[in-house]
Image (cartoon, grey):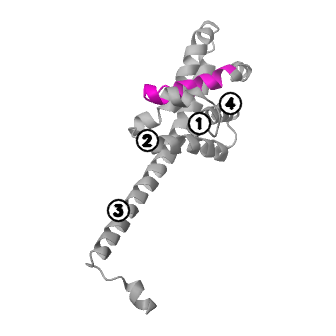
Amino acid sequence: MQLEKKLRARREELAPKWAEMILGTYPEETQKIWGKTKDQFHNPVGNTILETATELYDLVLDWEDADAIARSLEKMIKIRAVQDFAPSRGLSFVYLYKKLLRDVFFEELEEAGALDEFLRFETRVDNLALIAFDIYSTCRERLFDQRVTEVKKSQYNLLRRAKMIVDCSADEAE
């Protein structure tokens, strides 16, 4: 595939560009902070976005290891699932990869009569989005469960302190 060769050749340019596009989905102040430094200790979220975008860029090109793709997607999705994004916006980073490819290669491939190759490759990105959706749903479900558990614990502790509930574990200790 000619497109894959071009993508591999331009990896050092395009993977960071995709990460920049992902950072562009955040508010301006957040973009400044996360885009400023690439140090994993001073900027763990920005660093994770850059590393994961690069990792996913390669994994989509190879398209061999579904587990590796899922693990890599999960890193990015965990960051986005805890933020106040609608699911469509939380997963928009996948489609930004598609937009990047179109911006860079569409005209060239259209002139060369190779759009069929481009469309076949875009199918990988569409499949990536489906995998991402499953992971995102799982992450949001876990988050919801954790929040419900927190509320239950705080309610229980509040009622116990108000002496409206007898703590059975204290009675058993005596």
Q: Residues within 10 Å of mark 2 (few under 14, many from 20)?
A: few
Identity, as a three-letter code, of the amino acid under mark 2: Gln
Separation of marks 4 and 1 at Cα, in angstroms = 27 Å
Q: Nearer the viewer, mark 4 or mark 1?
A: 1
Q: Which residue is mark 3?
A: 151
Residue sitting nearer the eye, 130 or 49: 49
Q: Which residue is mark 4?
A: 61
Identity, as a three-letter code, of the amino acid under mark 3: Val
Circle 3/circle 2 CB separation < 8 Å = no
Q: Which residue is mark 2?
A: 83
Kindly state the secondary structure of the residue where label 2 is placed: loop
Kindly state the secondary structure of the residue where label 3 is placed: helix
| Residue 50 x %, y % | 62, 32
* Residue 41 sits above or below residue 19 on the image: below
Q: Nearer the viewer, mark 4 or mark 3?
A: 3
| Residue 52 x %, y % | 62, 36
Identity, as a three-letter code, of the amino acid under mark 1: Asn
User: What secondary structure predominates along the stretch shown in magenta?
Assistant: helix
Would you say residue 21 sits in the magenta stretch?
A: yes
Which residues lie in the magenta part? 13-30
Q: Earlier in the sequence, mark 4 or mark 3?
A: 4
> Quadrant location of residue 82?
top left
Separation of marks 1 and 3 at Cα, in angstroms = 31 Å
* Residue 15 sits above or below residue 69 on the image: above
